[in-house]
Image: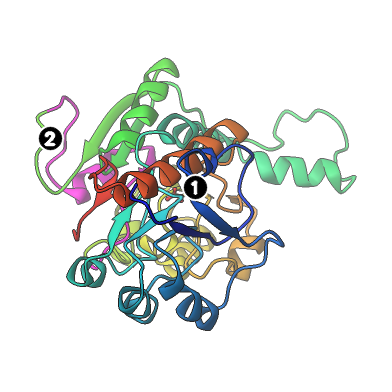
Amino acid sequence: MGDEEKKVLVTRAMPKGGLDPLTAAGCQVTQRLDDVAYTHAELVELAPNFDGMVCLLTDKIDTDVLEAGARGRLRVVANAAVGYDNIDVERAERLGVVICNTPGVLDETTADLAFLLILAAARLASDAERDLREGKWAGWGISDHLGRDVHGRVLGLIGYGRIAREVARRAEGFGMEVLHHTRRPTGFPGFVETLDELLSTSDAVSIHVPLTDTTSKMISKRELALMKPTAVLINTSRGPVLDEEALCDALDGGSIFAAGLDVYESEPAVNPRLIASRRTVLLPHIGSATIETRTKMVRLASLGVVEVLSGRTPENVVTPR
Ligand code: GLV
């Protein structure tokens, strides 16, 4: 890694062992341990003093941070997440700052959570549990808490990357037929050419696209209106892909059956209408949140930093979309 000791900023407390690659490579690690996010101004001030940074999706690595960093010694930023819409990758490339993410290590864990939401939304699990917790359960009722079956139904995947394919694998085990739609034909069975067709034929729709200018609000009023009134909508990708107000209208108006969400338009704020709805299952962005997976993510991000600072190009480098 060169003779000079490399300095790496880690923006938060991280799962145990995740940063081992940095210490093993002899990096001097400065870590925020109080688990409070750095402000934007703090990141701008700190960035130039470090060769590398391991950050979270809640850290906004924008032009200001990158320019300040590049004026100093910053060469690499590794996001401990697979999504990297919090980073201005285009600007980073122009400034010569390498950006890494954590693909591959969270696919199964995130697919598990997407499937949890498919099942929980179809069975209105949160509503049923709420009744129990609030002491409103009067005993077994033949017509109480009636959800929808998932077996024998069609799952429509929007996007067909690694996570979506893991969701597909799970769905087959649950007796579902699986379709998918992407902008370009995948060549795989189940490909549906238009989003509209996918939406109108699926009983469960699960979103698996990154947040970009093209995918922002891709599921809005028009798209929701195409879904079956018996269908459920799941989002474990990024909140702004979905128009939350339009979703609330669709839920309140009964034009879809239920929704399962792990991500929100303005995290950590959650639309009060979603919270009030009896037809939502809402989780606080925990798609990859297992001890094993989060540790692997931080290790992969740390390895990316070590590789770049050693003059190599790791596989987890991202380029502008
Ligand atoms: C989590 O949302 C991630 O992108 O890893």
Q: Secondary structure at mark 1?
A: loop
Q: Residues within 10 Å of mark 2 (few under 14, many from 20)?
A: some
Q: Who's the residue at 30% across and 66% down the image? A: 216
Considering only vertical position in the picture, is 276 above or below 23? below
Q: Answer left or right for 112 relative to 155.
A: right
What are the residue bounds of the magenta stretch?
188-213
- Choose between 190 and 77: the one closer to the eye: 77
Residue 131's disc number:
none
Q: Where residue 193 appears, x then y in whole percent?
A: 12, 42
Q: Who's the residue at 20% across and 49% down the image? A: 195
Q: Where residue 15 appears, x then y in whole percent?
A: 62, 42
The residue to which callout 1 is attached is 257
- Choose between 174 and 97: the one closer to the eye: 97
Amino acid type, callout 1 = Phe
Q: Secondary structure at mark 2?
A: loop
The residue to which callout 2 is attached is 186
- Choose between 54 and 186: the one closer to the eye: 54
Tell me if residue 206 is in the magenta stretch: yes
State which quarter of the image contains the C terminus.
bottom left
Q: Answer left or right for 73 relative to 118.
A: left
Amino acid type, callout 2 = Thr
Circle 2 or circle 1, nearest the eye = 2
Q: CA distance from mark 2 to mark 1?
A: 29 Å
Instruction: Name which of mark 2 and mark 1 comes first in the sequence.
Output: 2
Whether residue 219 can be seen here: yes
